[in-house]
Image (cartoon, grey):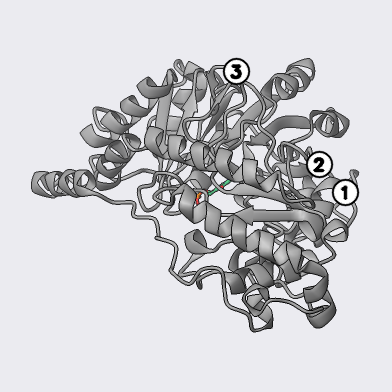
Amino acid sequence: MDMDPTARPAIMGGAPVRTEPFTDRRTMGPEEKAAVLEVMDSDCLSAFIGGPGKFANGGPRVLEFEKAWAEREGFKHAVSVSSWTAGLVVACGAVGVEPGDEVIVPPYTMSATSSAPMFYGGVPVFADIDPQTYCLDPASVAACITPRTKAIIVVHLFGRAAPMDELMAVAREHDVKVIEDAAQAPGVRYKGQPVGAIGDVGGFSLNFHKHIHTGEGGMLVTNDDDVARLCRLIRNHGENTYDAEELPTTVNIVGGNYRLTELQAAIGTAQLDRLDGYLRTRNELADHFGQRLAQIPGLTPDVKTDGVGHAYYVYPIQYDAEKIGLSRNLFVRALLAELPPAAGFETTPMTEGYVRPLYLAKIYQRRHGWGTGGQPWSFNPDVTYDYSEGLCPVTEDLYNNRMLICPLIREPLTTTDVDDLVNAMEKVVACGPQIQEALGGGEEQILTPVASANKTDVR
Ligand SMILES: *Cc1c(COP(=O)(O)O)cnc(C)c1O
C-alpha cells in the first residue's frame, strides 16, 4: 500500500503522533504536607492500644478521618484499616465466614478479593461477569448458590457501581451476606446510595494507585452496628477486648493488628477533600473519550447507565480484532509506538487483558491455599470445585480477546491529551491490516506491565 510517510505507523518507522510525555499524577499537596507536620509535632504517630479502653479504636486523627469519610457519604460507620486487603479479611470475619463456607466472587478483579475468605477457611466460588458492566452477573451468581454459600463479594470493577438491586435480591432470597469491594469506586453512588454499605459491609483501598491514598491503607464502611463492632475488634486484637454481653455471638473473636497510623489518617483526611474534583475530572474526560471512541468502528466505549455512578479508576474499552483487521495485542504495541514512553502504570496509554481470570492461578489449580492438607478445600472433602479453563467464558473472552484498559482518563490530564490518544488510536486502526500484514505472528506476547505481571505462571 502506498502511504503518506507521515501517516505511516510509528511501529513501522513512521513519525509518532505524540512525543511529549503525559503528565504523571501528583498526589500530595501542601495540605497533606501540613497535616503530616502537625502529627510530627504532636509526637503521636499512633495512639492505638491493643486492649479495651480509651484508645482501643485509635487516636484523634484516625477517628477524625473515619468520621469525615462516614459523614461525607452518609455511612453509619467507617473503620480504617492498614490496607484494603486487610479490610476484606476483616469483612469476611465480621460477616462470619467459617471453614468450608463458600464465598462467591468474580474472577476478574485484584487477587485479594478471592483470597480474603480463605483466611477464615472459606472456599472461593467464581461466578462470571456481565460483558457490559464488567461486574458480577446476577444470573451467574444465582447459579453458584449452594446450601454452603455464606457470602458474595461484589466488586465495583474499574469504578463502576455493580447492579446492586439484582445482586442484593439474589443474596436476600438465599440469606447470604454481601461484602462490597469498592476499592476502585470511592465516592460512587448507585441509584443515590453510596456504594460500600449497600450490602452488609464493604470498603475502599487507599493504596498509592487508587484515586485517593495514604500510601497503604483502607476504609471499611457499614450501616450495621454489630458488623462495625466486629470490624473494630478484628482490626485491633479483639481477643483482649472481648465482652460477651456486647457481642452478637457467644464466641470470642481473634483480632490482628490492621491499624492505620495517625500520619496516614491525617493524610487521608486531606486527600478526602480532593475526591470530588477527581471524580468530576475523570467523568468529564471519560465522556469526551467515549464520544470520540464511538466514532471508531471496532472499538466499544464504556456504556453509561442512568443512576449508576462511575469513578473511572481506569477506562474500559472492548476491541474487535476482526473488524479492525489487527490483533488486539499488536494494536496495543502499535499504539504505544505512537505515544511517549510510560514512566509507570499511570502514564501507560493502554494495556490489554486486565488480570488473568483468578481461578487459573496455581493456588486454585492445585487447591492448596495453606497448610499441608489442601485447605480450605479439604474442609468440604465431598465437594468438587471447578476451576478449569472455560469456567467463566465471558471473563476469559474479555481477557484473551477483547479487553483494553486505559489508565490515562485521570487528573491532571485534559481533553487535549485525550484527543492525542484518540488520534493515535484512529491512526493505528486506519493502518490495521497493513500492520497485521507486516508484523503479525508474534503478537501473542503481552508486553504491558499489568497484564504481564499476571501472565507469567500458568499451572
Ligand atoms: C486495590 C484493590 C484491592 C486491594 O487493596 P490494597 O489496599 O492494595 O490491599 C482489592 N480489590 C480491588 C478490586 C482493588 O482494586
The residue that label 1 is drawn on is 393
Q: Position of residue 392 (x, y in %)?
A: 85, 47
> Could you say whether the residue bearing mark 2 is in a helix, strand or loop?
loop
Question: Which residue is rendered at x = 48% and y = 35% of the image?
Answer: 186
- As drawn, the label of residue 76 is none
Is residue 200 toward the left or the right of residue 130 in the image? left
Q: Please say whether residue 89 is visible from this viewpoint.
A: no
**Residue closest to the eye, 394 or 342:** 342
Give the residue type at disc 2: Asp
Question: Which residue is rendered at x = 70% and y = 19% of the image?
Answer: 165
3 or 1: mark nearer the eye: 3
How packed mark 1 is, by other alpha carbons closer than 10 Å (few <14, some 14-19, many 20 or more), is: few
Vertical position of residue 192 compared to residue 90: above or below:
above
- As drawn, the label of residue 128 is 2
User: Residue 319, located in which quarter of the rendered image?
Assistant: bottom right
Residue sitting at the far left: 41
Q: Position of residue 13 (x, y in %)?
A: 64, 84
The residue that label 3 is drawn on is 191
Give the residue type at disc 1: Pro
Residue labelled 3 has its Cβ within 8 Å of some atom of ligand 1? no
2 or 3: mark nearer the eye: 3
How packed mark 3 is, by other alpha carbons closer than 10 Å (few <14, some 14-19, many 20 or more), is: some
User: Residue 287, located in which quarter of the rendered image?
Assistant: top right
Q: Residues at badges 2 and 1 in contact (C-beta under 8 Å)?
A: yes
**Alpha carbon separation for disc pair 2 and 3:** 23 Å
Give the residue type at disc 3: Lys
Q: Which quarter of the figure is the N terminus placed in?
A: bottom right
> Could you say whether the residue bearing mark 3 is in a helix, strand or loop?
loop
**Residue closest to the eye, 375 or 134:** 134
Labels 2 and 1: the sequence-earlier one? 2
